[in-house]
Amino acid sequence: MSGFPWSVLGIRETREKSAIRKAYSVKLKAMNLDEQVQEYAQLRDARDFALRLASQPLVQTTSFEDEDDDWYEDEWDIGGPVRVDQPRFDAEDEFGWEIRPDELSREALVGDMGDPGVSGSELGFPAPSAPPKRPDGWDELRAILYPDGEYSPEGLALDEYRQAEAALDRLIAVAEDGDIAFHDRIDHALSELLASAWPRSAPLVERANQSFRWLGAAGDLDESYALQFLNARIEGMRFHEEVMDAGHPLHKAWVELSQPGKSNILDRLRVKRGEIDRVLFSVRTQFPELEALLDEERVASWEKPANETVSWIVQRVFIVFLIIQALRFCVFDDDRRLDVGAESEQSSEELRKEGLDTASATAFGAGTSFADVEASDPEFAASFERFLGPVQGAALYGDPRQFVRQRILFARQSAEFDTLVAIQAQQLDWLQAARKEGAKSCAGGARCKLQERRAGDDAGTARCRAGTGAPAARCKAAQRRAEDRGVLLFGARLADR
């Protein structure tokens, strides 16, 4: 009994399927399937592999070593040229022919080496006179994967991995330099070796897959049992590499299940239960060997429902949260009720008039009300009110004096010469006053919003056209002149103050 799968089943190599199933049943009964998930997956793979070996036809092999050696030690029958008796040439024969030794193909010299149980003598060729020379790297690779000739479930050390990788590279180079048949024989033998030495051979499988394209043959009708086993392991290793990426949707769940110790209430709040279930389902149905990378205690704590103490704490915390929210809403609701009561003492219309009067006094001096502005120029008063917005004691758009100053400056576009000189003198006074206050006064001045002016122009133009039927351009010009007159009037009053 040595090597996979017999070491896992605990029996000697046999082709009796009943003995294999009996050994599997004995091992299965001794297991705790809830806790020994990895061991169960390995036992199941060993049973399937042993049954496949038992189904293969038994052939007589010509071994280069003792008959007591392992089956995997006889899987190579590759060597150098051997002596082949040359056919004799008969000159009297009408169909006489001659074949020179250098015209014989390598298959004719060494036989079919794809099956480790078929030798050249069984194919009609003479048996080799000396043991064939195995490809470079084969013996070293097998010695590393089978230390002391025995199966080992232990992983490779760093030095062993480097030696095995170098031996594998030499073996792949030999396969690539040979013909197609020789390449296929190395492909077949290497897959059998790596499958039988799993999991010790795990670091080398991906490198071999890149050279021989094993994963591309997954699902083919001629896919060997060893390749079926290795392709499943390759997909598992790639899944592990992907889930370790921080951008993978199941990364948090994988990291959570990999941490030692039981999970607590904070862990359950941080990671979604659905992601935990997806990780466990994927691992147990497709990649059972990956469950060995997860912490058993952590997984068990997630699979068990939360105890009564945790449920009690969560319920109490939720109740306290609801009480705090209710109190907060009640307090803010009372504040709002006080504000509404204060506003009910005065009507909204009174507040609006008070705000407009305050803005007018600010822009044109104390004692000036909004009614005075309307009496002087209704069009300008309407624009001024739109600028202030729905006033309730204060303007929403800043200092109303800025609006007046901007409209005075806009009036320069259509002002007479004398009026233009007065406007420029007024602007000079503003600039001198701003210079005395400092640079911040100049930089912080608000500008009248153009959209407000455009909105006012459009409304005035519409009223003009509705009343007179004049073109829009003429109405806009008339409106601009009317506004400029009002602006100049109040600009002069502002200058006097």
Image (cartoon, rainbow, N blue to C red):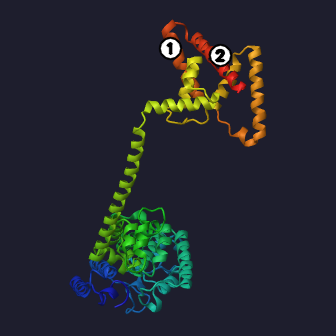
- In the rendered image, which residue does mark 1 sit on? 463
Quadrant including the C terminus = top right
Query: Can you give x and y, in whole percent of width and height, for residue 429 in the image?
Result: 77, 30
- In the rendered image, which residue does mark 2 sit on? 485
Nearest to the observer: residue 198 or residue 109: 198
**Residue 283: quarter of image:** bottom left
> Is residue 309 shown above or below 344?
below
Crowd rating for badge 2 (residues with CA inside 10 Å; few <14, some 14–19, many 20+): some
Amino acid identity at mark 1: Arg
Side (left or right) of 332 relative to 482: left
Specify the label residue 49 is tagged with. none
Side (left or right) of 261 relative to 473: left
Where disc 2 sits, the SS reads helix
> What residue is at 75 percent from the left and 27 percent from the top?
427
Quadrant including the N terminus = bottom left
For discs 1 and 2, the disc positioned in front in the rendered view: 2
**Residue 124: quarter of image:** bottom left
Query: Can you give x and y, in whole percent of width and height, for residue 176 in the image?
Result: 53, 69
Crowd rating for badge 1 (residues with CA inside 10 Å; few <14, some 14–19, many 20+): few
Query: Can you give x and y, in whole percent of width and height, for residue 106 in the image?
Result: 49, 73
> Is residue 408 shown above or below 125?
above
> Is residue 40 shown above or below 447?
below
Between the residue at mark 1 and the residue at mark 2, the CA separation in whole angstroms equals 19 Å
Nearest to the observer: residue 273 or residue 100: 273
> What residue is at 45 percent from the left and 62 percent from the top?
248
Amino acid identity at mark 2: Arg
Residue 403 visible here: no
Residue 189 visible here: yes
Question: What number of labels is visible?
Answer: 2
Report if the CB atoms under discs 1 and 2 are less than 8 Å apart: no
